[in-house]
Image (cartoon, rainbow, N blue to C red):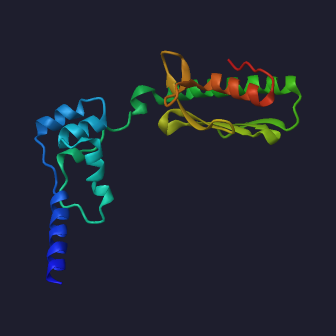
Amino acid sequence: MASRKLFLGLTAARRLRSRAPVLVPLSALLEASTSTSHVAAATQCSGVGPWGMFLSSRALSSTRQVAQSACDAPAPSAVGYRSILPEDEYHKLADETIQGLLEKLEEYGDSIQMDGFDIDYGNQVLTLRLGELGTYVVNKQAPNRQIWLSSPVSGPSKFDWDASTKGWIYRRTGANLVQLLEKEIGEVCGNSVELS
């Protein structure tokens, strides 16, 4: 019985030691924050590698964290889209794009004579119903300066204005909003469509 208590005591002591905060000089943190990867920064701060950081993570622990290490500094804040694209310019660009899509899709719907094809625009939301083939929704998200797309083919996407290409681009894949809609709607309906 005594040997079991000793073993449990040693195990508890090891756990506490493994949860001790890692203290890193500020200069190492600043150097790490300029690297291209958060994993690289974490590795540089701790010296234990990405798996070591993962396995010693406080998120895996049920105990309360006592001290915050220097490597737990918050990630850089999100891009402030308000400073990049002024609100009035955003509304002008987004409205032009959505109105252009509305006009081209109405022409397309008249030309293909498809059952269930319906297009509606209201409250800054463009809805394209393709009967049993699905529904597309395109809407403005002014606080983020984005246009959001809900597609029955590719799912949800958030498009940001890209001044260099003069188009709405999905940053995750690099897809252009108008080109993506042309491709998907053409494939779903079986007839090519030109929306630009």
Where residue 172 appears, x then y in whole percent?
49, 31
Rendered-image quadrant of the C terminus? top right
Q: What x and y, as percent, mark residue 184? A: 70, 28
Left or right placement of residue 138 versus residue 190 in this view: left
Q: Residue furthest bottom?
A: 1
Who is closer to the viewer here, 162 or 24?
Answer: 24
Quadrant position of residue 122: top right
Query: Residue 186 in the image: x percent, y percent?
Result: 75, 25
User: Which residue is at a point 19% across and 78% down the rendered structure image?
Assistant: 4
Would residue 157 appear left or right of 5 to someone viewing this image? right
Q: Is residue 78 above or below residue 168?
A: below
Which residue is farthest top?
164
Residue at 66% x, 40% y is 123
Q: Number of labelled discs?
A: 0
Q: Is residue 33 above or below residue 63?
A: above
Q: Is residue 109 above or below residue 70?
A: above
Residue 132 or residue 94, whichever sits in front: 132
Left or right of 102 on screen, residue 25 = left
Give whichever of 24, 76 is nearer the camera: 24
* Residue in front for this viewpoint, 36 or 53: 53
> What residue is at 17 percent from the left and 38 percent from the top?
29
- Report the residue at 10% width, 41% height from top: 25
Image spot of residue 194 (x, y percent) = 73, 18
| The N terminus - image quarter | bottom left
